[in-house]
Amino acid sequence: MGKYIVRRLFDLLPTVVVVAIIVFIITRLIPGDPAAVMLGPQASVEDIEALRKSLGLNDPLYLQFFHYVIDLLQGNLGVSLTYNEPISHLIMERFPNTLILAASALVIAIFIGIPAGIISASKQNSLMDYAVMLVSLIGVSMPIFWLGVMLVLYFSVNLGWFPATGMGSMEEGLIPYLKHLVLPSITLATIPMATFARITRSSMLEVISQDYIKTARSKGLGEFWVVCKHAFKNALTPLLTVLGMQISMMLGGAVLTETIFSWPGMGRLIVDAIDKRDFVVVQGTVLFIAVIFVLVNLFVDVMYKVVNPRVNYSSSKGGTK
Amino acid sequence: MSDFLLEVEDLEVHFRSSSSVAKAVNGVSFTLNKKETLGIVGESGSGKSVTATALLRLIPNPPGKIAGGRILFEGKDILALSEKEMRSIRGNEISMIFQDPMTSLNPVFTVGNQIIESIRTHRKVSKKEAKKAAIEMLQLVGIPEAEKRMDMYPHEFSGGMRQRVMIAIALACNPKLLIADEPTTALDVTVQAQILDLMRHLQDTIDTSIIMITHDLGVVWEMCDQVIVMYAGNTVESGDVKTIFDRPLHPYTWGLLDSQITSDSENEEKLSTIPGTPPDLREPIPGCHFADRCPYAQEVCFSKKPELIEVEEGHTVSCHFQTKEKRLKRKEKAYHG
């Protein structure tokens, strides 16, 4: 297991290199001149040219890439063209905000979505089952931007219960801070929650008809234990896959949610950077998100082994036995 | 209170679908004495497994339902117990082992965990004591290096070993009744014999009664004291093993016996089969359920259902032509198809 984790961490390197190359090329392909955007429409051609030169934008691509790689190897993601700050600072400033939003959304999604799926499966074809499935279908189909706006309209504008935008600070106290968190978390949680409910249900239904569930019942175990211990642990594998994907996406910055609620997270950082042609920021943040993806996937792979002893990582190829 | 460990009277189990009701078990009755082994034989779909599952009230509802009858276990009416009382019987006083040991153990828990769970569900013992008891159980069912094997997962065991583990789980609380639903069907022939030996040995050790569900008459002959032959949800014949093998009376039992391979079967000889398939239990059948496939069937068999009558002491049969007064003559090779 330990060896497997170390090997997977080494596998991270080629992934990061490939992502670095792709991101570098793509950011150069985006139309528009960063120097012109930075200086605004009034700037003279000379000023723009001077800025391009100082930013190294006139260098040939291979030279730019070379500098970029050298910087990367030194752990330097570069300096933002617009913020004039090292990218690592920007990420460290924004990522915790994204983390807080993602974590609270994940808590909502897991603690509502998974139990809903379990109940739905154990009461298959009941009114409860139909209700959960209908709500989750609406959940997965609802566009986030629309849901976010509706929540703001109703709970902020009409009822005034929660602030419409921004992220509170702890200095104002815990309650106002949490109030800021409520609407963005619900918005971000809706799709994962509905997905978890549906995946949990289908996976549980498959498991619940297995012989070992009959064995568990014949031992005299209560239905709660049969479902939550014997069935759920077996149903976890497909759920983990989806969980991993959702966590990665949330940590990568919830672009729409963060934009609607002006949440100062990674998603907003990237959108702003693209808007301002700040390709250094785009490069750095996308690379950072790629690493997060790989790490979350590694975590999910390790969890597979924890929940399912039949997963065998000791062979050279890995996979299941 | 009666002396019987188990009395089943007129058990009826129905499965409901949107448009019809299938009567999977249709008025089955039998009794079981302490330390006795009862065999329930019949082909697939005859209702033998459903009968066994009904004894533990584990029929999935919906679509299944115990529609009638009585099940008395040590005089207690199983069908009248609360779910909580029923749970204290399952795995404790009545245990069950299933056909396929490859799927009846939970793949994500260790074997030790699964035995300990069974013990701790019914006994107020510490984890340590339960673990000790579990190791003893594994030793009892003949698993070498029991202590080491406690921490292994089912996929690390062979089929025969898994069935031993299942038996260990089932017997962990010294049940008074063990229901074995085709316990050897999924196993190799040599392993089958070992498992049967083990069950017989354990029956002597812990004084348990066994209900053995099987379609293998060889197993019945080896293991059972009493037999009931089921067909399409009905008992067609019952009696003690010797009577059923020596003087079988129902044409279906004849068919089953004819389809066995015996040591004196000749190489070239074609194996007998009972032509046709069991009837659709969703359709009403006015006559004998076996009439369609019975080489002896006459008009009355299609219009009137035969009663189950005692033709000699302890030997009952349900056939219009097998009564105290009249007997049907068994034809040689009636089932050769």
Image: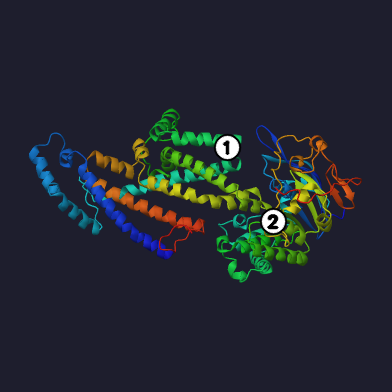
Percent position (x, y) of residue A39?
A: 15, 39
Residue ID for mark 1: A129
Same subunit: marks 2 and 1: no
Q: Quadrant of the N terminus of chain A?
A: bottom left
Q: Neighbour class for label 2 at 10 Å: few (<14), some, many (≥20)?
A: few
Instruction: Choose top left, top right, bottom left or bottom right for residue B111.
Output: bottom right
What is the spatial separation of the Cα atoms under label 2 and label 1, in whole angstroms? 57 Å
- Residue type at mark 2 is Glu
Q: Is residue A170 visible?
A: no
Q: Give above or below for A193 relative to B136.
A: above
What's the coloring here?
rainbow
Which residue occupies the foreground of this view, A185 or B141? B141
Q: Give above or below for A207 relative to B151.
A: above
What is the count of numbered marks?
Answer: 2
Percent position (x, y) of residue A265?
A: 34, 44
Q: Give left or right: position of B229 versus A304.
A: right
- Residue type at mark 1 is Asp
Q: Give left or right: position of B158 versus B320.
A: left
Disc 1 sits on a residue from what chain? A
Percent position (x, y) of residue A214?
A: 65, 51
Q: Neighbour class for label 1 at 10 Å: few (<14), some, many (≥20)?
A: some
Farthest residue, direction left: A46
Percent position (x, y) of residue A13?
A: 30, 58
State the mark number for residue A59. none
Farthest residue, direction bottom: B145
Q: Give left or right: position of B121 versus B153.
A: right
Disc 2 sits on a residue from what chain? B
Circle 1: element type: helix
Closer to viewer: mark 2 or mark 1: 2
Residue ID for mark 2: B269
